[in-house]
Image (tube, grey):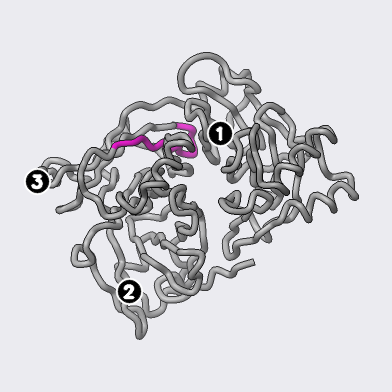
Amino acid sequence: MVGLYSWGPFKGRHVVSASFSPTQPQLLLLAFSLPTQGSNGNVPATVARRGLVCLWNITEPSRIQKVLMCEGTPTCCCFSPTRPTLAFAGTDHGSVVVWDLRELSSMHFVYKVGEDEWLIRSPTYTTDGVFGTDLGHHGAVNALVPVVSVEESHRAAASVEKTQTAHGGGLSFQLASMDEGGAIIFWTVIEVSRSSLDASETDLGLTPGGLIKIVKSSSFSLQKLSRKANLSGPMSARCLQLHLTDPNHFFIGTDMGYILHMVRHGGRALPGLYTTEQETVTEVTAMDFCPFGFDYFLVACGDGSVRLYNTDSEVPLMTWNDTAAGNPCRVLWSRSRPAVFYTVDESRVVCTDSNVVQVHQLAQGQAHGSSDERDRLMTKLQSGVFSG
């Protein structure tokens, strides 16, 4: 377990979201809430009333790499699928912001907090106030994911050193954002060429000198999708994940404990609904797919439990109880150890080794699914080999 210490500008704040870089797995983004009343102390007001996101290298946990700032409270965050130098966040205002970490320090401000000085980066681009209510989100953004297959991320990881500081133009990929009302928007991320440095004069979301912008490409509604799935009653969307090999398939966690499986284009997704055998309804707070193979995904729930699903089965294979002290805001499958996953709550990162927990669960009768399926899964986890 790693404690998330509150110091400097982060004093009085708690973690609300976390995301690993797909190309450099040692890099972790953490999004923080606004500080609790009276806890900001000697933090400048400009910083205290804004949201913060920090970049950590988990191999150097005692030092924050970069501090990012935005209007409102960041509610979710992610990296570019191809470059660890681009960070994104959704906010409680319904906006999406991007930071280009390649920007010179001289483009940003240094703030004095106590005896220390902190370089804090403002967004390169924000949709706040740029898109009207008919084009943007109507509520807080609670999910933000890149639309890319794992093969594309692996190719990008192989050439990451060449693209770390490149400003050659031509960068383009999509992001999907979702608000609590279930509106899903697809954005195209575009790199502005240096010859178009006056772009900020016509695009109010782009900071002067910024080279990254985002443009809305399409949208649709969860409520329309849930009616197609024959679900009665209103439900709120809590989290969103795309399939690692086919981003056309997306998975939506809800406040009713269901996970909806939909396709963006084409026919019907099967199974269309993932459920739980628990009698008590608990919301789905986060999901993550296995980065070593493409048949399994983890689901974090509001009661602190984590479920493991096979994409072909409606019910979980296993359930781990009490993996977090509070409401987990994120579950992350380790990018280097197939049997390990992390849960992030408001103040901690908890590491769980599923090899150890699974033995206990079998003894207690808490593992689900067929014994053959569990045996196949545990063999894959222990060997680190996933082939479907």
* Amino acid under disc 3: Asp
State whether residue 281 appears in this view.
yes
Q: Residue at x 57, y 23 (%)?
A: 226
Task: Kindly identify the amino acid type of the residue bearing the numbered disc 2.
Answer: Trp
User: What residue did someone put label 1 on?
Assistant: 252
User: Is the residue 13 above or below the residue 169 in the image?
Assistant: below
State the residue position of label 3. Answer: 198
Mark 2 surroundings within 10 Å by alpha-carbon count, few (fewer than 14), some (14 through 19), many (20 or more) = some
* Residue plotted at (31% across, 34% down): 188
Residue on which the image places disc 2: 118
Q: Callout 1: few (<14), some (14-19), or many (20+) C-alpha neighbours within 10 Å?
A: many
Which tag is nearer the camera, tag 3 or tag 1?
3
Which residue is most to the bottom? 115
| Cα–Cα span, label 1 and label 2 | 37 Å
Please report the bounds of the magenta region as a residue range: 172-183
Secondary structure mostly seen in the magenta stretch: strand
